[in-house]
Amino acid sequence: MAENILEVNHLTTRFRTERGTAVAVQGVSFHVARGEILGLVGESGCGKSVTSQSIMRLYDEKRLASYEGEVLFEGRNLLTLPEKQMQAVRGGEIAMVFQDSLSSLNPVFTCGDQIMESMLIHQKLPRREAKEKAIEMLRLVGIPDPEKRFSQYPHELSGGQRQRVMIACALSCRPKLLIADEPTTALDVTIQAQIMELIVDLNRELNMGVILITHDLSVVAETCSRVAVMYLGQIVEEADVLSLFEHPMHPYTRGLLKSIPTVEDGKREELYIIEGTVPLLSQIPQGCRFRPRCPYATEACGREMPPLETLPSGQKVRCFRASELASGR
Amino acid sequence: MEQNMILSARHVRTWFPVRGIAGQTVGNVKAVDDVSLSLFRGETYGLVGETGCGKSTLGRTLIRLLDPTDGQILLDGTDITKLSARQLLPLRARMQMVFQDPYSSLDGRMHVGEILMETLAIQKRGSRKDNMELVLRMLEQVGLLPEHFYRYPHELSGGQRQRVGLARALLPEPELIICDEPVSALDVSVRSQIIRLLLDLQEQRNLSYLFISHDMSVVRYMADRVGVMYLGRLVEEAATDELFRHPLHPYTRVLLSAVPTPDPRTHRERIVLEGELPSPLSPPPGCPFHTRCPRATEQCRQAFPETKKAADGHLVACHLV
């Protein structure tokens, strides 16, 4: 088994708001091995992006957020690292790709400038060398005519091209861990396929760990080796990709899988509906957080929060009735 | 057959002129170019294609939110291509639209009730009291509560906003609804709710949908027939099952091969597209797809492929089929 590049232990992220403290991420633990792609899935507001941005410590700790727990990156706890050292980690050893390339790239700098930036800062390369490497990066991510693109501005590129530029920025310093936050959500399926293929190829070539944050289970099925499902700030299930798709244990995971519209022999399969909506962070239910929407909830589910239990198969699930439901299937 | 047709478009073109410095036309963006299609009563027609292929422009042109440059559009046999805004008004009730982004398609300064009452006021229906009752009944039908009447759009979730959008489209009792990516901005669980609602409403009211989407799994689920657009042209059309099982056009094959499947065991052969989408300002000569087509021949580079009829009502515009 490969060593873990990242270990997150009991991470809790709290935000101070006008109406009191909101706990956006609550006791989240997972790990990423070197060269592994971990999928982090869930709907809007489940805390997947907050988790990833907490790993990078991107929130203003003086005024906005407070973290608790441990984020061990190669054994060092990032949460207690002095800001100066943290800056060396950000963009250097851990890099991030965001969903919206138009707002994540700076419109007044050329693509080349933005790819070179982290190399100039982290690796202290001379400009000429950085430029050569940046063009090489552009070629690596499959952008035709990289010399010309180098001096173009983000708005001159298509959405797919911009996403590639952002990946080039992220990979320019050869990070050990890449966090890709919905990297293909705004893109067409053909471009999505190309970008995902690129991420998988680079993951293999550079032996880089990847956290892929997405709400699209089909993308997860095709690219990830392990998956963690989040609901309302907690991990509710974690398993290798085959087990998760073939034996989902948590009612929420099952619901998500059954919500994918499928057609068998020209007939529509009944589309499953998870009743209700994700509650607000200020209205977190007592006990199991999924209880109000769960078709299997009992009274016991409302009294106590179920722990994230590890089953003999290695699958982890946060549900009192998981094994009972699994055997009754 | 003809009788059951609610909408029919013949050789529709929507071109946007590009102006030079002196205001002269220097070119045309051919957003929709020579598209013919028909929509039957109670049917869902799925329109797919990549960003910029003209599917939204076509949807808007078909109900005259945009004016076609050329061609003919018939609504239930009536030619609406050249009607003035005033002449169109009574027909507008019969054709409605649901937009992708429920955030920007609802006026943030009006509460839900006002938004919905406005629709009825424009159509000059009944008294205020009657209209209010209609609106309340409609809220219930789309799965909202009476208390939502006085809520503002920002107080609603994405799914609830899309329900309001749907209620607004349904109030004039249309026969046809253009759904432009109605579930693309929604979460998985909310998406199922809206899809189910759309299907239920269609059954109750015998609605026809033109369902525009880039999500193939949703289109496969919703549509009876599917049309594939590329660079302003309709390149293939067939019954949904037929299209997904036996795609004929090379572009359709590429498009379908890119769709991920929710099964970790399948490893499909993916056809990777070369190059970028050409500009609709100067589409390539011959077949518009030849610059990226893995099977393009000399003929494709020179001659435009006419739409042919293949087996089982399958229409395709490709020299190689």
Image (tube, coloured by chain):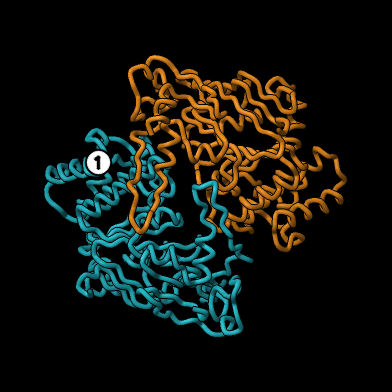
Chain colours: A orange, B cyan
Horizontal side of B261 relative to A142 (left or right) equals: left
Q: Position of residue A96 (x, y in %)?
A: 66, 39
Q: Chain of mark 1?
A: B
Task: Choose top left, top right, bottom left or bottom right for residue B212.
Answer: bottom left
Using the image, determine if residue B135 lies above or below residue B47. above
The answer to whether any part of residue A103 appears in the image is no
Give the camera-side residue of B130 and B74. B74
Q: In the displayed image of the protein, which residue is found farthest to the top?
A: A303
The residue positioned 77% from the left and 42% from the top of the image is A173
| Residue tagged 1 | B113
Quadrant housing the C terminus of chain A: top left
Give the camera-side residue of B134 and B38. B38
Horizontal side of A308 relative to B119 (left or right) equals: right
Using the image, determine if residue A79 lies above or below residue A91. above
Q: Name which residue type carries label 1.
A: Gly
Q: Position of residue B192 (x, y in %)?
A: 36, 44
Q: Secondary structure at mark 1?
A: helix
Quadrant housing the N terminus of chain A: top right
Dot 1 alpha-carbon crowd within 10 angstroms: few under 14, some 14 to 19, many 20 or more: many
Using the image, determine if residue B99 lies above or below residue B256. above
The residue positioned 68% from the left and 55% from the top of the image is A153
Q: Position of residue B84 (x, y in %)?
A: 27, 70
